[in-house]
Image (tube, rainbow, N blue to C red):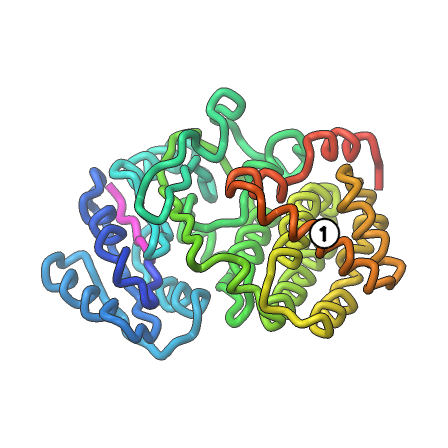
């Protein structure tokens, strides 16, 4: 049984950290290297890491000045010695057979990496009713960058519901881009572009904690959107340079609503900052026309049109109306609203670029 390295970035998560670590050390698959990267925590997280290292010789702790999530993951990659790499965010949990499932899947398929199903949990650990990928709709299959029916949906941006062959990552000489949001998306889309074989398993291996106290309304500052602008420019250029804009259209369709609603929901932005963000990201919304991605919801259609026409005051009026509507929605409806309508994808399949 080959060794799997599990990389866990840690920053001020003392409330959840023990649960996360316990979910790894109790795995049914035991040949693990567990790297805890304390990224300059100011609470008791660093001490908790050290306590667990004393209890389990598979655990190594690295304390470093704060470099952000990407910097912590890069430290993990630098010190990883396993044949395979998995990631766990320190406020989430693995299912207890996660490593066994992923190891068997990547061995059986000889894949560059494997993508698995996962389920959301509330802050208190209560599981949502259904996993993110419906089991009746998505069975095990091999993804393809030429498949616009299923692969674009399963190829989510996160690194934590995947297992990577270390030799594959080494061949790409890849690391996470530091000091930018959407670091997962930059990393995973580039891996997908460069991969030969990627498979999906419908087994649920991960519990993703929805922390509403750290909500988008509180976290999305102008600095965040400046970073998003740079990150999504990098992603677009990677697809374009590798001549894979066909697949990028579907990635874009998923991303456009998501980013737009983060902008709408944010309470940290002044009107002047909002206009500057719209000016800087005009190129992104213009892509909906250039690469022929339809906007089915009329509200979104009007917003995109007003951005492209540089009528930013009108854009903000539309955004204010939608922000009020979204305040009355449940978290499930908000999440559903942020995803493209299925008819978007049907319309896209009829268009050539």
Q: Does residue 59 appear to the left or right of 131 in the view shown? A: left
Residue 129, percent across and down? Answer: 40, 30
**Residue 221 colored in magenta in the image:** no
* 38 shown above or below 137: below
Q: Is residue 196 visible?
A: no
Q: Is residue 136 visible?
A: yes
From the viewer's side, name the closer residue of 330 and 277. 330
Residue occupied by mark 1: 321
Q: Does residue 63 appear to the left or right of 198 in the view shown? A: left
Specify few, some or many for label 1: CA neighbours under 10 Å numbering under 14, 14-19, or 20 or more. Answer: few
**Residue 4 colored in magenta in the image:** yes
Quarter of the figure that contains the N terminus:
top left
Residue drawn where x is 79% and y is 62% of the image: 282
Q: Which residues are magenta?
A: 1-7
Residue drawn where x is 62% and y is 63% of the image: 228
From the viewer's side, name the closer residue of 146 and 315. 315
Residue 117, percent across and down? Answer: 43, 35
* 317 shown above or below 28: below
Quarter of the image where one finds residue 223: bottom right
From the viewer's side, name the closer residue of 332 and 290. 332
Q: Does residue 138 appear to the left or right of 87 in the view shown? A: right
Quarter of the image where one finds residue 130: top left
Residue 39, percent across and down? Answer: 34, 71
Residue drawn where x is 38% and y is 33% of the image: 204
Q: Does residue 328 appear to the left or right of 165 in the view shown? A: right
Residue 320, percent across and down? Answer: 71, 56
């Amino acid at each position: 049984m080959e060794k799997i390295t599990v990389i866990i970035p840690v920053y001020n998560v003392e409330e959840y950290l023990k649960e996360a670590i316990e979910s790894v050390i109790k795995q049914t698959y035991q040949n693990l290297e567990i790297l805890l990267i304390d990224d300059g925590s100011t609470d008791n997280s660093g001490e908790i890491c050290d306590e667990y290292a004393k209890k389990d010789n598979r655990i190594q702790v690295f304390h470093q000045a704060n470099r952000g999530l990407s910097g912590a993951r890069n430290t993990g990659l630098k010190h990883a010695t396993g044949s395979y790499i998995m990631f766990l965010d320190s406020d989430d949990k693995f299912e207890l057979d996660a490593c066994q499932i992923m190891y068997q899947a990547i061995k059986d398929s000889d894949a560059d990496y494997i993508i698995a199903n996962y389920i959301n949990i509330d802050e208190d650990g209560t599981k949502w009713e259904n996993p993110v990928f419906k089991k009746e709709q998505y069975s095990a299959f091999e993804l393809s960058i030429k498949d616009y029916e299923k692969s674009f949906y399963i190829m989510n941006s996160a690194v934590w519901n995947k297992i990577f062959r270390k030799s594959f990552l080494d061949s790409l000489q890849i690391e996470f881009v530091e000091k930018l949001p959407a670091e997962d998306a930059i990393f995973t889309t580039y891996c997908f572009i460069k991969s030969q074989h990627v498979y999906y398993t419908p087994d649920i291996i991960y519990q993703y904690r929805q922390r509403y106290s750290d909500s988008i309304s509180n976290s999305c500052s102008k600095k965040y959107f400046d970073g998003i602008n740079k990150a999504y420019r990098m992603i677009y250029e990677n697809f374009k340079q590798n001549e894979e804009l066909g697949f990028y259209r579907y990635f874009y369709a998923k991303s456009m609503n998501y980013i737009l609603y983060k902008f709408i929901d944010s309470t940290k932005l002044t009107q002047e900052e909002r206009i500057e963000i719209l000016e800087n990201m005009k190129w992104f919304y213009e892509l909906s026309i250039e690469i022929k991605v339809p906007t089915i919801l009329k509200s979104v259609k009007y917003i995109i049109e007003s951005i492209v026409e540089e009528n930013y005051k009108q854009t903000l009026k539309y955004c204010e109306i939608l922000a009020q509507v979204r305040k009355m929605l449940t978290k499930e409806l908000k999440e559903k609203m942020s995803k493209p309508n299925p008819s978007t994808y049907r319309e896209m399949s009829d268009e050539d670029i």
